Amino acid sequence: MQTERTAIVTQAQFAQQYREYLEKNGFLDTAFRLQKQPDGSVALPVLCNRLSQLRHLNLCDTLAPGSTYTFKNPVASKKSLIKSCHQRLQEELRALLKNHGVLWNEELIHDLPQVWKRHGDLIVLSENTFLADIWKTLEPELWQVVANALGVKRIAKTGRISADGFRTPRVTLLLGDDAWVHHVDNGIRYTFDITKCMFSSGNITEKLRVSSFDCTGEVVVDLYAGVGYFTLPFLVHAGAAFVHACEWNPNAVAALLKNLELNKVSDRCKVHSGDNRQLLLRNVADRVNLGLIPSSEEGWPIACQLLKEDRGGILHIHNNVSLYPEKRDALFNRKTNNACSSKEQQQKLTGTVPAGSNSETTVPEITYAFQRCTTEENTLGSRWKDNRPKVKSNCGTYYEKKLVTYPEWQPWAESVALRIRNILEAHHKRPWSTNILHIEYVKSYAPHIDHVVLDLECRPCDDN
């Protein structure tokens, strides 16, 4: 079958000028390649629906001598011969419907997946794909066609995370008998049952950051280990001497044990199965990772008990932080100087009365201390690979300069620092200080909701 196309023909020495101009201005038809003509000139295929515009541009005067004519059977470019996964999928689904006597309609295009997650030979489709009733009538043949088009052997479809306390994914295996998959992140091998364990690829930046920590000689407790998202980076790359990994989902525990073996670090990790609030460990940790969202607040008391009593340590506190002003101000009011006493605030926030509390100091005054403590330098050593400038407030909390990308995060961080300090003082019956080392952005879940990690240094104060 012959196909007609319109091309601008110009001398070979001007072809590159024409090509750059046509491509830049959206006239070049990239589905076809440039053709050299018998007389040595070059034909540059152009889009037919832009031809009328080209005729009015008088390119032969503005660029170089040239002309417009029609040639037959243009040779397709290499780019046009390579079909994308989406093109192959649509073509094979069209053929499937035709074989079953079903007419294709353009509404079905919007029912096809645009993105998917791939784990080796298994892909996971999102819940908002293949919703039309017609697809149900074509199962299971439908899933074999999808697998062939996308070059995999197994197909699964996801739903929302279950509210069962285990954050179990609602994933259904549509094609294949085995739901165990393999995944590699930053040289770390993970394996897990995708229908029973959650794996967040969106946390890769935080996993890379954890891998960059210098944890030589440190004991780390991972309170929400899952299949080892952060446990393994602490062991494999950060060089932690030992990690206590806590997890209460038995399916995740099974995967975690396999992953420790896969990465040859099982001798440096103890897995604690069950509710971490019942954990009997105390006074062991240089670092505690609290990687639970939307909030890890329930783990704060046990995290404080896990830190070494004589020198404290660092808490990595994950949380979803709202950027809506009304919610932000409700958590930590920066503007009102007539708030209730700090004692009342502390009791409300922690349920305890901290050691050495001053009932005359209000929370807004403490917040103001953060705002004004930008000149007094602090020389405390950092447990990080690089040294970062810090300043000290008069409320026992340290603040590192130039760390917050969004100022909306700062009230939340200050609130957490205060609450953690209160918990530590109530537990140990002595003064402690908290130091905001860093606030790390991980990802956004929705407009104005950010997943962030607060790195909080916690140290007992000198009794003198």
Image: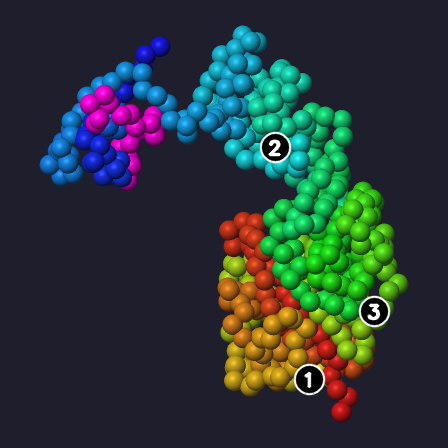
* First along the sequence among labels 1 and 3: 3
Q: Amino acid at mark 1?
A: Asn
> Which mark is drawn over residue 284?
3
N-terminal of the pair, mark 2 or mark 1, is 2
Q: Determine whether the residue tagged by mark 1 lies in a helix, strand or loop.
A: loop
Q: Residue 336, position in %: x, y?
A: 53, 75
The residue that mark 2 highlights is 125
Residue 339, image x and y in percent? 59, 76
Q: Amino acid at mark 3?
A: Val
Residue 113: give x, y in percent of width and height. 54, 30
Q: CA distance from mark 2 to mark 1?
A: 56 Å
| Left or right of residue 342, residue 58 in this image | left
* Colouring scheme applied when the structure was drawn: rainbow
SS at badge 2: strand
The residues colored magenta run: 22-41
Rendered position, 377 above or below 1: below
Name the residue at 33% across, 27% down: 33
Camera-near label (2 vs 1) is 2
**Residue type, label 2:** Leu
| Residue located beneath label 1 in the image | 358
| Camera-nearest residue between 6 and 170 | 6
Residues at marks 1 and 3, CA–CA distance in whole angstroms: 31 Å
Classify residue 314 by image quadrant: bottom right
Query: Magenta region's main secondary structure?
Result: loop
Decide if residue 189 is in sight here.
yes
Q: Is residue 237 above or below residue 387?
A: above
Residues at discs 1 and 3 in contact (Cβ within 8 Å) = no
Instruction: Decide which of tag 3 and tag 2 comes sooner along the chain.
Output: 2
- Rendered residue at 57%/24% (across/down): 149
Give the crowd class for mark 2: few <14, some 14-19, many >=20 residues within 10 Å.
many
